[in-house]
Amino acid sequence: MYGRSLISLVIAHSLGKRGIEVITCDDVDLTACSFSRYVRRSFVHAPIDRNPQRFLDDLETRLRKLRPTDGRPYALIPVFRETTIIASNRERFAGFMSVAVPPEQSIRAVHPKDSLLRTARRLGLPVPSTWDPDGDGEELHHLAEILRYPVLIKPRDEVGGRGIVKCHSFPEVQVAFARYRQERGESPLIQEYAAGEDYCLTVLYDRGRRIADMAYRNLYRFPVESGAGIVRETVESAPFLETADLLMRDVQWHGIVELDFRWNPAVGTEPLLIEVNPRFWAGLFHSVESGVDFPWLLYQLAVEGHANPSSDALIGQRTKVPGLWLLSAIHDTVASDAGFENLRTAWQEAWSSQNEQTGRDVLHRVSGILDSGVDIRDTYDTIRSILREGRQAKNDVFFRDDPLILLGVFFVLGSLIRHGKLPPEMRNR
């Protein structure tokens, strides 16, 4: 499902290269997957958001029509936002095909965030201090003497850092809390800001028993502050497994899952569990390139009832989203978004005014145009260092044996140009 997504494209490559007939679907046409040589056919179904019941009826009708008549395995693999609605309506499809989603009751135990908070507290899992104030603001008032700043105002059901507001004082909390209540009609969570870096643990469980795992950290993001990783590096998963196994065993998880942690290994603290995503993740390509082929393992689990345990991930493996990783790196060298916009304007002016010059010449001319306090020499040296660092990272968009998918990748670029942001699945960690 969700054939527009680069995540779905990774799944299609994994299964298609093994000779499995791949069909993709979406509520839009001309997706990245529809151009892939590893996809046999694609179809368009009714939109999910406008009328969920119509979406389910349309999807079931089309899937029944495409059902193979020769006894081959037939599996439905949700990818992103459709995962929860398919889990809630599994019985509509389970009678004639395998459905590769975790049980609905397992998902409800960890998603959305307030559910995870209750389950984590029951199990005594390491999580940041979190408060769930009541809607009338009475409990919020009592938090004024308790909160230690900064704190985060967090939506209950968002992914990839979307909608999070960092507050440095109680008046800021009050404003952000009230705005959230007005816009969404419910109260947000308030969570202490956990120091350290973000780590992503990706796992496959067979009824609570871990089959495969790998972990990575994001070296660079886009947008820089809270966006999805666009340069990733595989790390040891061991520090996160005890928490993950205890949680997933308790809720009898069956399928793939991604858990977000916050951790500062230098100070010897334990990783804090931040979020659980009951679906595929933006860094799926990175997981596969690190030696853990989650799409293939999930397919085996869905159609055969079991999957062979995976080998260990390749520690230190790096991948990148071409173009965006360098843009993020440049952004990261400037103190603020306003500074970045000034730098971009000055860059364009300096470059257009010179016919022949080196990159260093342009940077020095930019420094003469800007009055923003940016140390242009440090910027230049930083970008050179980042270029060297990312040169060996593999691209997670351009598959050499599948060139026509570039037509579908234009969807990603079009979203960035038209809406000023990436598609939602690329903003998921």
Image (cartoon, rainbow, N blue to C red):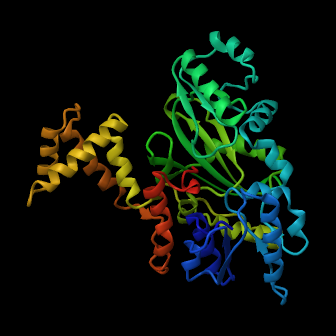
Of the pair 299 and 237, the residue shown nearer to us: 299
Percent position (x, y) of residue 394?
A: 43, 64
Determine which quarter of the picture holds residue 91: bottom right
Percent position (x, y) of residue 39?
A: 62, 80
Where 397 falls versus 122 (above or below)?
below
User: What residue is drawn where x is 78% and y is 73%?
Assistant: 75
Percent position (x, y) of residue 5?
A: 58, 64
Where 258 falls versus 136 (above or below)?
below
Where 352 falls versus 18 (above or below)?
above
Of the pair 320 and 96, the residue shown nearer to us: 96
Determine which quarter of the picture holds residue 17: bottom right
User: Which residue is most to the top?
Assistant: 145
Determine which quarter of the picture holds residue 239: top right
Query: Quick check: 3 left or right of 46?
Result: left
User: What residue is drawn where x is 55% and y is 31%?
Assistant: 165
Q: Is residue 391 visible?
A: yes
User: What residue is drawn where x is 44% and y is 59%?
Assistant: 321
Of the pair 297 and 417, the residue shown nearer to us: 417
Of the pair 148 and 236, the residue shown nearer to us: 148
Q: Is residue 291 visible?
A: no
Where 178 falls versus 285 (above or below)?
above
Q: Quadrant of the N terminus?
A: bottom right
Percent position (x, y) of residue 183?
A: 65, 35
Query: Quick check: 87 left or right of 180?
Result: right
User: Which residue is most to the bottom?
Assistant: 70
Total number of numbered discs in the rendering: 0
Query: Quick check: 403 left or right of 293?
Result: left
User: What residue is drawn where x is 31% and y is 41%?
Assistant: 340
